[in-house]
Image: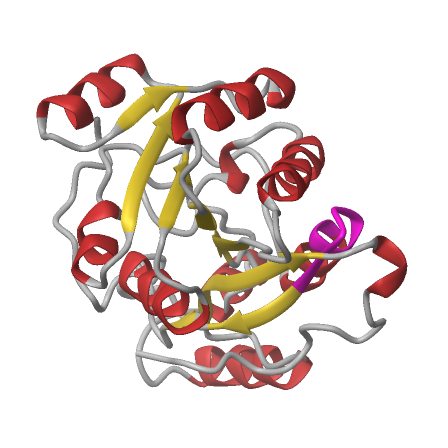
Amino acid sequence: MKYDFEFSWDSTYGYAARLVGDNADRGLVVDLGCGLGTFSQPLVELGFDYQGFDYDVASVAECQQRGIACESIDLHDMGRARDIVLAAIGDRRVVAVALLDVVEHLPDPASVLAGVAALLDALTSDGHVPLLVTSIPNVAHADLAAKLALGRWDVTETGLLDATHITLFTHDRLIEAVDAAGLVEVARNDVAFADTEQRFPADHPAVADGTPLRNFLRSIRLRADPFGHTYQFVRCYRRVDVTEIPTNVGRAAPRCTV
């Protein structure tokens, strides 16, 4: 229950909600790994219907108590998960599937992404192709790069190095993962912060304000690629045949920053 937080339009969920609102027709959004259903609030405000699914029994019960449609699901068994989703939605038209702050918690994200891609195929009908919206932390943020260069790797309760993160993603690794699942990027609304919760200890020369070392390390990181300040990759995809995917998809700089 530790991820019970108030929704904000300036949060990752707010960025993801805008992405769905700008790119999907109004209809049902399926939220896989929904936690306590925080993503339902902005979607309802934008005119979407919502159906959540989560593995944690307590979270599912809490959602239902709050009046949020939610059922139990296990993403480690995507065949069974697909059947549960299809039974729950009935004949409602799904316009998007959300996978927010989920992929990094999975020991085998490739299998789950492949299963989600198959789910998107099953939800496609009459020429209507539902979108997939994801949010995934960037382990190559400049703060982490600077600290790692000096031998620090500080796991925290939440944030970029959340203690429950199992699989870590750079931008290139994300591109490889979605390419392999037959997903092509439609739009992005990445969250970018110059400074993160990893800026500690306050006197550490790699992260302290104004130190020559911090400025030097950050300048190197920002020259390496456009994602040195990207905190979360917030992306929208559609399902395509693997042979249709362009070779240079998704390598531009983040569109939105805060």
x, y percent for residue 152: 49, 51
Furthest residue toward front: 126
Q: Confirm whether the magenta stretch covers residue 173.
A: no
Residue 5 % position (x, y): 16, 44
User: In the picture shown, does residue 245 fall above or below 128?
Assistant: below
Q: Is residue 63 above or below residue 5?
A: above
Nearer to me, 124 or 31:
124
Residue 182 on the magenta segment = yes
Q: Quadrant of residue 88?
A: top left
The quarter of the picture where the N terminus appears is top left
Where's residue 67, x and y in %? 11, 30
Above or below 102: residue 221: below
x and y, in percent, of residue 178 in the image: 70, 53
For residue 102, side relative to residue 173 (left or right): left
Which residue in the rendered view is the most extreme toward the right?
Answer: 243
Q: How is the image coloured?
A: secondary structure
Where does the magenta region start and end?
Answer: 177-184
Which image quadrant for residue 246? bottom right
Give the position of the C terminus as an image quadrant: bottom left
Residue at the spot x=45%, y=46% of the render?
Answer: 94
- The answer to whether residue 157 is seen in the rendering is no
Nearest to the observer: residue 185 or residue 160: 185
* Residue 55 in sight in this render: yes
Q: Is residue 222 left or right of residue 225?
A: left
Residue located 66% across and 29% down the image: 108
Is residue 20 toward the left or the right of residue 146 in the image?
left
Q: Residue at x 62, y 52 (%)?
A: 126
The residue drawn where x is 40% and y is 40% is 92
